[in-house]
């Protein structure tokens, strides 16, 4: 594959713990007694908050996921190779290779579809990351996006309910790549797409797929329609709906794993 576009990566350093001297042991013991009481009260507060209707407890790693756009390396968020077992038509295996990476961007019409932008802006749209992949045969290209928001757990749960259907024909923008198989991937080449907002992550995941040969598509289809049984059109037969939905689900799982690991790291 041709070289990728350059991308900047930032990472925060883990804080160094202080070493406690033996002379402070008595103070630590006294603080521990008080600490256990405070922790017990805090846990009770969390339990009460979770029991209130409409106020779900924040999932593990939720807050950490919000910062992944600048805390995690690009190869973690968008691995160079993604394996999608069972992600193709008839549960065929898929392998996607990253060919383009864009720098992180502000939430704007240049990187987000109009309907999605209007939906996430009131929640506090933080940052958008995008990359483009191709399949193992280099016959299809897929632009994926990670939209990080400041939504709380309740708002995120509401946001994710039937998001693609609610947005209608809100097709995500394509990310072409000069000197790659995605060089001709533009608005008219978009064939199928999917948009998902998992309830346990303050992120919206998008994907839009198309043919690598640059052919145009008159009417892009949401992935669930393109994957419907009995479809004989070129978009359905080529599995572009499976590509869009399969890679979206894969990135969701990857984000969840990364956020959980970041949360555990903080407790060490």
Image (cartoon, rainbow, N blue to C red):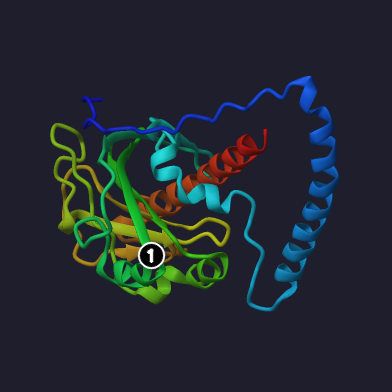
From this view, report whether residue 112 is shown above or below residue 92: below
Is 130 situated left or right of 154 in this image?
Answer: left
Q: Residue 229: x and y, percent?
A: 47, 63
Res. 188 image quadrant:
bottom left
Q: Quadrant of the N terminus?
A: top left
Tag 1 secondary structure: loop
Q: Nearer the viewer, residue 189 or 177?
A: 177
Residue 213 rendering spot, x and y as whole percentages? 18, 43
Residue at (52% x, 59% y) in the render: 198
Q: Looking at this view, name the residue that lies furthest to the bottom.
A: 53
Q: Residue 69: where, in percent of width, then height?
A: 40, 44
Instruction: Decide: is 192 above or below 89.
Output: below
Taking 71 as reference, is 198 left or right? right
Query: Label 1 belongs to which residue?
Result: 124
The quarter of the picture where the C terminus appears is top right
Residue 179, image x, y percentages: 14, 31
Q: Residue at x 33, y 32 (%)?
A: 9
- Is 9 or 210 nearer to us in this picture? 9
């Amino acid at each position: 594959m041709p070289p990728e576009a350059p991308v900047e990566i930032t990472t925060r350093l883990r804080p160094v713990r202080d070493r406690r001297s033996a002379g402070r042991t008595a103070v630590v013991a006294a603080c521990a007694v008080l600490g256990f009481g405070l922790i017990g009260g805090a846990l009770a507060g969390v339990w009460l908050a979770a029991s209130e209707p409409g106020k779900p407890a924040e999932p593990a790693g939720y807050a950490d996921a919000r910062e992944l756009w600048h805390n995690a390396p690009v190869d973690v968020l968008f691995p160079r190779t993604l394996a999608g077992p069972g992600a193709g038509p008839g549960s065929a295996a898929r392998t996607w290779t990253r060919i383009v990476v864009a720098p992180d961007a502000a939430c704007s019409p240049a990187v987000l579809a109009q309907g999605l932008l209007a939906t996430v802006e009131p929640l506090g749209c933080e940052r958008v990351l995008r990359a483009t992949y191709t399949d193992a045969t280099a016959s299809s290209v897929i632009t994926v996006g990670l939209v990080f928001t400041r939504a709380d757990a309740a708002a995120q749960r509401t946001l994710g309910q039937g998001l693609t259907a609610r947005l209608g024909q809100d097709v995500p923008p394509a990310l072409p790549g000069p000197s790659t198989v995605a060089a001709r991937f533009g608005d008219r080449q978009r064939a199928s797409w999917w948009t998902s907002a998992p309830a346990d992550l303050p992120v919206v995941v998008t994907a839009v797929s198309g043919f690598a040969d640059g052919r145009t598509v008159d009417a892009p289809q949401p992935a669930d329609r393109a994957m419907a049984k009995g479809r004989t059109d070129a978009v359905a037969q080529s599995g572009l709906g499976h590509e869009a939905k399969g890679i979206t689900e894969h990135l969701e799982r990857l984000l969840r794993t990364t956020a959980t690991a970041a949360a555990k790291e903080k407790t060490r």
